[in-house]
Image: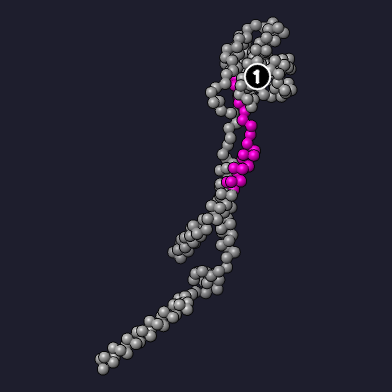
Amino acid sequence: MDSHGNKEIEIGKIIKLLIKKSWIIVLFVIVTTGASVIYSNFTKPTPLYQTSASLLIQDSASIINTLQVFIKEPPVMEAVIEELELERSMEGLANQINVQTVQDSQIVKIYAIDSDPYRSAEIANTTAKIFKEQVASTLNFNSIEILYPAVVKENQPPINPESNRLIMFGMVLGGIIGIGFVFLMDSLDNKIRSERDIENLLEIPVLGTVSKYNKKTLTANKEKKVEAYVRGDVSESKTG
C-alpha cells in the first residue's frame, strides 16, 4: 500500500510540476516550431509537374518493348531540344522523361516532368510526335498513333507537394526538450518544500511541524491576547 501511495504522490507531483512550468514547455515549442517554419521556407523544393501523352503501337509486345527504348535515344532527344529550343543537354532531357507500357496492352505512355506544367506537356507531346516520325523514317514502321496528347489540368497540383512533417517534428521536439528542461531544473533545485523532502534528505521520520510565523502575524496574535486579557479583567471587576 505504501509503495502504491508513493507512486500516486510522485505522479501527482510530476503533473503539478508540468502544469506549473507549462509556460517553459510552450516557449520551447514556439521556438522550435518557428525555426522549423523558417527552415522549411528556405529549403522549399521547386514544384514539379508531370503530364503524359499516350501512344498506340499496333504490334507484338516484343516490338513494343524495343520501340519504347528508342524514345529516349539521342536522335529523339536532340530533335525535341531543337524544336522546343530547350537549354539543357540530351541526358538532362532524358532524365525528365519516363516511358511506361500499360500492362497487357499496346498503349505506351510518355511522362514528362518539368517545373512549368505547360512546358511539361510540350515536352511529352513533342517527344511523342518526333518519336513517331523518326520510327517511320528510320525503321519504316507506321503503326504508331498518338491516342491522347498531354494536357495541363486546371490548377494542376505538383507531384512534390510541400510537407508539414518538418514543422510537426519541430513541435514534438520542442515539447520533449521543454519537458526535459523542466525536469532538469527541478532536479537541480535543492530547496526543501515539504516534509517528504526532509525525510528523503535526512532519512528520518518527521515528528512534527511548526507553523510559519512572521512579524505581522506575531503582532496580531499578541494584540488578540492583550485584548482578551483586558476583557477578562473588566468582566471580573463587574462581577466583583
Q: How many marks?
A: 1
Residue 236 picture location, percent across and down: 29, 91
In percent of the image, x 57 and y 14: which residue is there? 148
Quick check: can you spot residue 176? no
Q: Which residues are magenta?
A: 32-52
In percent of the image, x 62 and y 13: which residue is there? 61
Q: Is residue 141 above or below residue 108?
A: above
Residue 203 picture location, percent across and down: 54, 72
Q: Is residue 181 above or below residue 225?
A: above
Decide if residue 176 is on the left or right side of residue 240. Answer: right
Residue 227 picture location, percent across and down: 36, 84
Q: Is residue 124 above or below residue 175?
A: above
* Residue 166, quarter of the rendered image: top right
**Residue that sits furthest to the bottom in the current view:** 240
Quadrant containing the C terminus is bottom left
In percent of the image, x 66 and y 22: which residue is there? 97
- Dot 1 corresponds to which residue? 123
**Residue that sits furthest to the left in the current view:** 239
Decide if residue 157 is on the left or right side of residue 232. Answer: right
Residue 202 picture location, percent across and down: 55, 73
* Residue 99, quarter of the rendered image: top right
Q: Amino acid at mark 1?
A: Ile
**Foreground pick, 171 / 64:** 171
Indicate whether residue 51 is drawn in magenta: yes
Q: Residues within 10 Å of mark 1 (few under 14, many from 20)?
A: many
Quadrant containing the N terminus is bottom left
**Foreground pick, 179 / 152:** 152
